Image (tube, coloured by chain):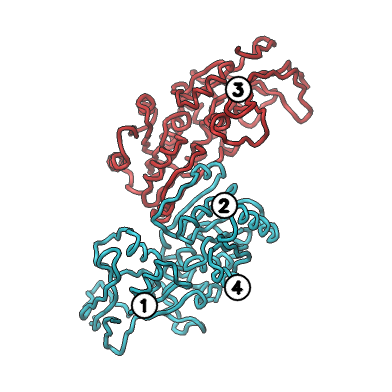
Chain colours: A red, B cyan
Amino acid sequence: MTTVLGAYGYQLTAPGTPLQPYKFPALDPGADEVAVQVAGCGVCHTDVGFVFDGVPTRHSLPLVLGHEISVVVPARGLCAVPENLPPGLSLEMLSVVADAVTTPYEAIRRAGVGPEDVAVIIGAGGIGSFGVQISAALGAAVVAIDIDHERLKRIARHGAGLALNARTADLKGIKGAIRAFTKESGRKGMGLKIFEMSGTPAGQTTAFGLLDHGAYLAVVGFTAKPVELRLSNLMAFDATARGNWGCPPDQYPNALRLVLEGKISLAPFTEQHPLEEAPAILEAAARHELPRRVILRPNHGNGKRKPEGA
Amino acid sequence: MTTVLGAYGYQLTAPGTPLQPYKFPALDPGADEVAVQVAGCGVCHTDVGFVFDGVPTRHSLPLVLGHEISVVVPARGLCAVPENLPPGLSLEMLSVVADAVTTPYEAIRRAGVGPEDVAVIIGAGGIGSFGVQISAALGAAVVAIDIDHERLKRIARHGAGLALNARTADLKGIKGAIRAFTKESGRKGMGLKIFEMSGTPAGQTTAFGLLDHGAYLAVVGFTAKPVELRLSNLMAFDATARGNWGCPPDQYPNALRLVLEGKISLAPFTEQHPLEEAPAILEAAARHELPRRVILRPNHGNGKRKPEGA
């Protein structure tokens, strides 16, 4: 019923090219439509895939990317958050719940992670940093593996009982360290729950190499690149590999609750930028230069629109 | 308490060499041991792996291979069969239940195959021929894929509603044929249950290539060779890949029942040879020259032993 003044943003017009600014005129939502005001939008590596790695989009270009948003809606929807958020949280920040938190949450939920488990999270970046915190919140002893020293230092303060650098340790060394950690933590020595959250062929190779008898491997990160592996190891180890395409909406409130209760910290693992930086941010993401999950913040002005950052 | 006269057979003394005859002197089982008389022993491709493909054995050589046996025991054990078997069945023939029937049975049980499913069995050989029959017995519409015309003709008479030759059809053609078959059979068009039972890299590549949204892929056949695949497809398709290391003993009676009820035919898919042919049979298996699962039959004589076939 309300007419809103319009919208602006950045769209992909052709693969391999920078995002281009666009501007919508006034929006006139129909009776079965709703206009929402985006507070923040998390930048995901699947967006990088569409722009730089030739991953085909389902709809034809041009397309506005960005599927990880928090919004203000005229009427309350499924996953409404309290008016007054706990200190340190903002609506913008909660945008990352829509994918970076819920997707690992769903992977960890399907794996049935609990206090008796050792959870190994490969990749402590935009997804894995939340995967570690979720696993720890569910009581598991958590191992984080990454190639970045700073990320490992940060995640060791947020749930990882063991943080391993895959640049300085080979598979044998990683296995030995996990074995010792498992023993120290009083968990049983078999049936690791492994979560590939780096979205890289190297991470996937490590993940598959860690399979032990009864292991469960969740494929959470995405890469379009193939890997060479001995698929029969699933049979030899009586193991399961499972992927999840996002998270069903009925699980969002459970993931959000962990955030609101402070069991998942967002602030140390996110950074906010104006939406106008979208094209540059996407290029930096493709070069793996972003230390934290980026949240883009549109400028809503005062009824005025600032259509581009040029 | 009984002393038995002895035993003979064929053992692996060094990888890559023919099996060698051996002879045990009189056996004297202790109070917690039992001597059994082997009726038949099925030849499995994992045996071929130990002899010809460098798959390491768990214990040191020399070793007697053969893990798929039917035996006569002094006291009845877990999975005793009726004194009078149904026509067309013999104790020797039942040896293949110990792995070639129970291993696909367990894979199919874990997958939860039922009347609403389309089951795709890749490889209609020593394991897959039983996989097709088990899936059909559970009510699924069954697709069999192999590269051997005779095998495909045979399995089309034993449960396969669609038999596809992967030598003459590419992945796109196979997908199209499965789609049409799914429609005809009145099943839903997504969430295939795929069973890799060929134990070959080509079969594994096809199996992975058939993943659709919500698919379940069971890795049943074994090959030591690696394959190149896009592991992230598990995530993109919300799919599961699962292996099973054999079958827990408590499921043996269920698999055996299907055989005794005639829902799984053994005769058309097995052939019997004297144990003395073991070395030659293993070499033929390595060359993929055996059209059926081979059962080796020891010669028990009349209290006398015939120690070798030379």
Q: Mark 2 or mark 1, which is nearer the start of the sequence?
A: 1
Amino acid at pointer 2 = Leu
Taking depth in this image into account, of A220 and B177 the one nearest to the observer is B177
Mark 1 vs 4, N-terminal side: 1
Can residue B75 be seen? no
> What is the C-alpha distance between the residues marked 3 and 4?
58 Å
Residue B142: give x, y in percent of width and height: 60, 63
Q: Mark 4 falls within which chain?
A: B
User: Which circle, 1 or 2, is nearer the viewer?
Assistant: 2
| Crowd class of label 3 (few under 14; some 14 to 19; many from 20; radius 10 Å) | many
The crowd level at tag 2 (other Cα within 10 Å; few <14, some 14-19, many 20+) is some
**Residues at marks 1 and 3, CA–CA distance in whole angstroms:** 71 Å
In the image, which is nearer the foreground, mark 1 or mark 4? 4
Q: Where is residue B100 in the image (x, y as percent from the top left)?
A: 45, 68
Image quarter of the N terminus of chain A:
top right
Q: Name the residue under label 2.
A: B210
Other residues around mark 1 within 10 Å, as few (<14) / some (14–19) / many (≥20): some
Query: Which residue corresponds to mark 3?
Result: A19
User: Disc 1 vs disc 4: Cβ atoms closer than 8 Å?
Assistant: no
Residue at numbered disc 1: B71
Residue A93 placement, left or right of A302: left
Q: Please state the total of marks drawn on the protein image.
A: 4
